[in-house]
Amino acid sequence: MSDKPPDPFETIVNNESYTLIRAAPGVHQFRFKSRGANAYLVQGSRRTILIDVGLVSTFPQLQHGMNYLGCSKADIDLVVLSHEHLDHIGAAHLFAGKTMIAAHRLAANKIALRDDFATLRKMFNEPNVPFDVDLWLEEGNVIDLGDFQLRVMHTPGHTSACISLFDQDKGLLFAADTLMPGGVMGGIFGSGSISDYIESLHRLAGLNAKILASGHGRLSATPIHDAHIAIERSRALLSDTGQLFDALDARENFEPIMQSVRDLNKLDD
C-alpha cells in the first residue's frame, strides 16, 4: 500500500499532446507535452482570463481544451503574461485585437522592442509576430474577476519582469517560473538576479498559499514547503556563484575588462 497522498487535482483530458487539469473550481491548467509553458484558464463570475498562453505550436491544444470546457477565444477578456519568455507569450498575438493583453511594464517594454535576447526567441522555432501589450501591470494591482481577486506581485529573479498572481481568500498562487513544485528553480536569465530571486521566494513563502500553479510541471498542494526548498537552493546557488568569482579573482580581471570597454568607446570617437 502506497504512502503517497492522493492527487487533489482532477485530470480531465490526457492525450499525447497535452493534459487538462482542474486545479480548483473555475481554474484549469493546460500542461503541454512540448517546450511550451503551462497556461491557466480562470473563469470568474464576471470575467475570464488566461494566464500565459504557451507557444504558437501548442495553440491548437490550448484551443481544444478551451472548447472542451465550453470557452472560446471570444470569451477571454484578458491575457496576462507572467514575463517575456517566448514559451509563455508565443501565442499571444493570436489573441491580440479583441482581447486585452497585460504584462509588467518591464516585460511590455521588451516585447514592444522585440528584444529577441530577452524573449529567448532563438531557443524556439516559432514565427516572429509582433503584438502590443495593452495594459501595464504593477505591484499591488488587483485583477477583479468577480469571485476571484488576483493581486499582482512583482517577483523578479528569473527575469526582472516576472509577476505572480495571488488570490488570498482562495490561497491560489500563480507563480510562473519563480516557484515550481518541489522547489525547482526556473533559472536566472538575462535581466534576472539570484538576490532578487531569493527576496521574491521569501515573499511567496510568507503567503497563505494552498495551491501552486506554476509555469512548468504539475500543480502543487504544498506551495509553502516548495518555497522553502527553493530558498535553500537559491542560497546555495548564490554561495556557489560567490566562490566562483573568488576563484576567478575578479579584482585582477576588472582592469583588463574596463580597458576593453574604453577601447571600444574610442572606436566611436
Image (cartoon, rainbow, N blue to C red):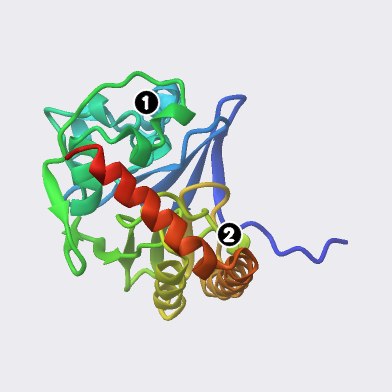
Kind of residue sitting beneath label 1: Gln
Q: Choose between 102 and 26: the one closer to the eye.
A: 102
Q: Position of residue 99 (x, y in %)?
A: 16, 34
The residue drawn where x is 45% and y is 26% is 58
The residue drawn where x is 35% and y is 18% is 127
Q: Choose between 102 and 124: the one closer to the eye.
A: 124
Q: In front of the other: label 2 or label 1?
A: 2
Q: Quadrant of the C terminus?
A: top left
Tag 1's secondary structure?
helix
> Quick check: 51 left or right of 193?
left
Q: Which residue is mark 2?
A: 181
Between the C-alphas of marks 2 and 1, the distance is 26 Å
Kind of residue sitting beneath label 2: Pro
Residue 56 appears anywhere in the view = yes
In this rendering, the answer to whether 140 lies above or below 68 is below
* Mark 2, other Cα within 10 Å: few <14 / some 14–19 / many ≥20: many
